[in-house]
Every structure is written in structure tokens, then in C-alpha cells.
Image (cartoon, helix red, strand yellow):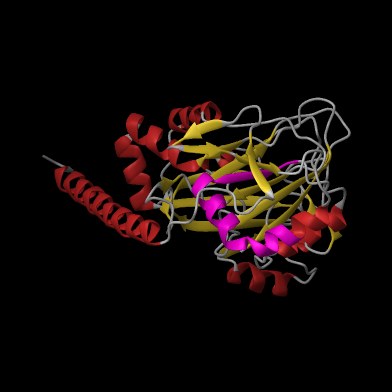
Amino acid sequence: MEGSGDHEALMAALMANRQLLEAKVAINNAILTANDVPTSPPGDFFVVGECDGQKTIDGEQVPLVLTPAIEGGTRHEALVAALRAEREWLEGKVVANSAVLLRGFGVRDAAEFDAVVEALGWPDIRYVGPAPRTHVHGRVWTANEGPLEQSVYFHHEMVLIKEFPEKVILFCELPPPEGGETPFVPSFRVTERALEEFPEMVEELDVKGLRYTFTAPSNNNTGSMRGRGWEDAFATSDKAEADKRAKALGMDVEWLLDGGVKTILGPRPLTRVFPGRKGQRMWFNTVVGMHGKELSSATAADGSEIPASFVQRCEEIIEEESIQFRWRKGDILILDNLATLHGRRPSLPPRRVLVATCK
């Protein structure tokens, strides 16, 4: 039959891809077993608490809530000292639980939050992406400065760039009067459910890879959730230098007549498996956020279209698996960026959430 050879070749490639991923699972499970960390909080500084919206996923509390053992809370200096002493333990919990919420430690502002970030000892990584942001203090930046009445779609931070952060640390300096939650999703759950409903589509896109385009203005536009200008993103107003920096990040560019730029990225994977995370396949892409949008696109790397019905259902699955809690002043949320997608709910003003991104 005409075309049967192509179908057989595709199915063989899908089977090879599955076998490769199964091998990665076995390797990563071995790594996880060899690197088990203590599960109980060390010493007498932290106790495990609870928060609204918390779920138990794959046997772990998500997020893991850590509060002061001292009744009435503590000051940020004590938290900084404890984090320096227990870096390895805390990092193990971030990986095991995908998210850790530090609550009640008296962190008041950007400078104190920066001290917490430094105490964790994870190297800094500069944000590259479409969200308009402003530097605040040290390693601390504002989170997306787009209009508060708009939501931010679920994403892994800098998922399209060659080098992306392993941790995203968020600090609530001023909680909003209503809304404004930072929902997040265990990424492997999205892959599991997508495989249940669309096994051939998931495997086909993993074999082909994905291609993305995004159009950015020259200067920042805080009236848009994706309004960061290319001059800010590439830290230069020189097009030749910007082109060089874009290539170093793994993207091509096309300069537009209005002074903006169209970036082209791909191929990129649909799912990824990372060491130490139980061999789980993470939904490490931004198809839902970029497919069919005004300033962006997401297709298979060979140029073929991704069915809109598939993208819509994936968006629904992500929402169904989401976890969220009400921000409190001083909260610090540490996300494993390799294992969680996160977003932002619309809110009433004022709201001030700051962020640091770490390798």
C-alpha cells in the first residue's frame, strides 16, 4: 500500500524513542536510590506545616511547607543561618517534593530575600525571556510586570533556551487583596495524562521535535505579558551583537521593518527526563503557551501543524493538575524548574512578588 513504508518507519522511530526513554528511567532511578536524603527536617529549626491547596502526589506533599519551630516565628537572619547549614537537605527536598514553601520566617523586603537566595548557594542565571522585569536588589528581580488583570500561562522558566534555571525562587513582598496566586503543576503528571489520551501524538512530537517563533518589540511594553523588548532581553541595542547573543542562546533571528525581531527556536523536545527525578518524563515545552497566538507559534520541527484539539486538551489537563495557595506576606516558594510548570492568576492591585533564578 502506498505510504505504508513511511508509516512503518515512523512507528519504528517511535518504538526506538520509547526504548531510549525507558533506559533513561532505569538510569535515573538508580541515581535517585544512590542519592537518598533524610526526609525529616534537621535539628529543631524547621517543622513541617500545611497550606491550602496542598496535594499528595507520588507519595510526597506538594508543596512541602516548612515553618519555624519557634512559636511566633523568627527573623530572616535565623533563616539565613539555617539554610547555610542545611543546604544539601533543603535541595534534596526541593527535588523530592518539586516545591518547598518557606512560611513565617519574617522576610520583609528584597534585600532580606536576596540574603536568603545567597544563603542557598545556588549560582545565579540571568533571565532571558519575553516577560518585562525590573532589577530590584542583588540577584532579585520583579516577576512579570504585565497587567495584573491578565494571567500568565503555565511554563517552565526559560524552557526554550539552551541553559535554563534549575530553581525558581519567588518571594511575596505584598500579597494582593484578591487573586494573584502562583499556581504550579507537577510536570510529569501532564505527560502521563497526555500519553493516556494521545499516545501516538506525544511520541510523534517527541521524535520530530518542536519549532517555535516569537516576535518581540525593540523596547519594553509593560502593557503586555510578553512585552519585553529585544534590547533589554539581549542587553544591547546593537543588532549585530544581539544576533550573536541570540545564536549563543540557541535561536535564530529575523529583523523586522518596525524595529522588532522574530526569533526562531528549534528543534526542541516535547518531554525530557532529568537525573534524580524518578525517571519521570517532564512536559518540558511551551506548546500551550505559544501555539496559535498573535505573537508566537508552535509547530512540529518539520513544519507540520499541531492539532488545535490536542493543544486545547493539554491546556485543560495542565489546569486540572494545578496546585495553588493564597500568598502571605513573607512567603518564599522554591520551585524545581525541571519538574514544575508555573503561572500567575489575575489579581486586584497591589501585588508585589519578586523572583530569583538559579542554576
Q: Is residue 215 visible?
A: yes
Residue 301 in view (yes/no) = no
The x, y position of residue 156, in whole percent, is 58, 48
What quarter of the picture does the N terminus occupy? top left
Q: Which residues are magenta?
A: 81-103
For residue 337, above or below residue 201: below
Closest to the observer, 354 or 69: 69
Query: Does residue 195 sit above or below 348 in this rendering?
Result: below
Q: Is residue 26 left or right of residue 50?
A: left
Nearest to the observer: residue 62 or residue 273: 62
Viewer-proximal residue, 226 or 262? 226
Residue 273 drawn at (x, y percent): 40, 54
Which residue is at a point 80% across and 68% down the rendered structure image? 237
Q: Residue at x 54, y 64 (%)?
A: 162
Position of 21 compared to 185: left or right?
A: left
Instruction: Classify the position of the C terminus by image quarter.
Output: bottom right
Which quadrant holds residue 90?
bottom right
Which residue is outermost to the left? Answer: 1
- Is residue 324 rendered to the left or right of residue 14? right
Q: Is residue 200 magenta?
A: no
Residue 345 picture location, percent across and down: 71, 31
- In the rendered image, the vertical position of residue 42 relative to residue 231, given as above or below: above
